Image: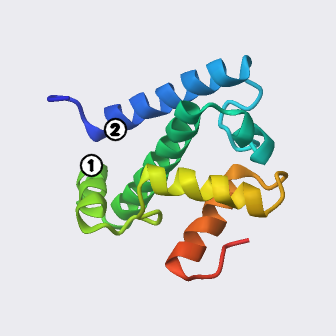
Amino acid sequence: MAGMTRGTCVLGAVLVVTMVMVSATGAVEDPHGLGYDGRDWEAMPQAARLAYVAGFLAGATTQQGVERHRANPRVSVDAAVSEIVRSHTSTFPFGVNVYASDLQDYYFRYTLSTKVYQAMLDENAKMLRRPSPR
């Protein structure tokens, strides 16, 4: 990946998630995946689940980097993202497999009608021992 910026890598991850979701569902009904709920999660093959979570985590960390850049324009988004990753200060600090496994457990315990992004927020808050943002 030499010569590629983090932004390019993130864009690539988003494209992979989109392609996997298209193949998993047969059609793109929700291009951003925000409407997906537990039924959609259950229907996804494992590779699509991991790709979805990876894209979610990459997007969350990138947004944090953008916010840090806006707060201090002398810090590039790339530098901010690198620092977030290096210091493990992401809003979602755990790995792809951790969140994918937790989502599986979440939908076993709770209703399938909960959106995947909300389930991610709920499970992350539980792991961090914080209240979930609802």
In percent of width and height, residue 92 lies at 47, 63
Under circle 2, the secondary element is helix
Q: Point out which mark residue 22 bears.
A: none
Q: Nearer the viewer, residue 65 or 38?
A: 38
Residue 2 lies in quadrant? top left
Residue 81 to residue 2: above or below: below
Residue depicted at 85% across the width and 52% down the height: 113
Residue 69 lies in quadrant? bottom left
Reading the image, the residue beneath label 1 is 78
Tell me the quarter of the image containing the N terminus: top left
Residue 5 to residue 98: above or below: above
Relative placement, left or right, of 48 versus 75 is right
Residue depicted at 49% across the width and 26% down the height: 15
Q: Amino acid at mark 1?
A: Asp
Marks 1 and 2 close (CB-CB < 8 Å):
yes
In percent of width and height, residue 42 lies at 73, 40
Label 1 CA crowd tier, 10 Å (few <14, some 14–19, many 20+): some
Under circle 1, the secondary element is helix
Label 2 CA crowd tier, 10 Å (few <14, some 14–19, many 20+): some
Relative placement, left or right, of 33 versus 69 is right
Residue depicted at 76% across the width and 63% down the height: 109
Q: Amino acid at mark 2?
A: Gly
In percent of width and height, residue 126 lies at 59, 75
Q: Nearer the viewer, residue 79 or 97?
A: 97
Relative placement, left or right, of 127 versus 68 is right
Reading the image, the residue beneath label 2 is 7
Between the C-alphas of marks 1 and 2, the distance is 7 Å
Q: Earlier in the sequence, mark 1 or mark 2?
A: 2
In percent of width and height, residue 129 lies at 55, 82
Residue depicted at 48% across the width and 26% down the height: 16
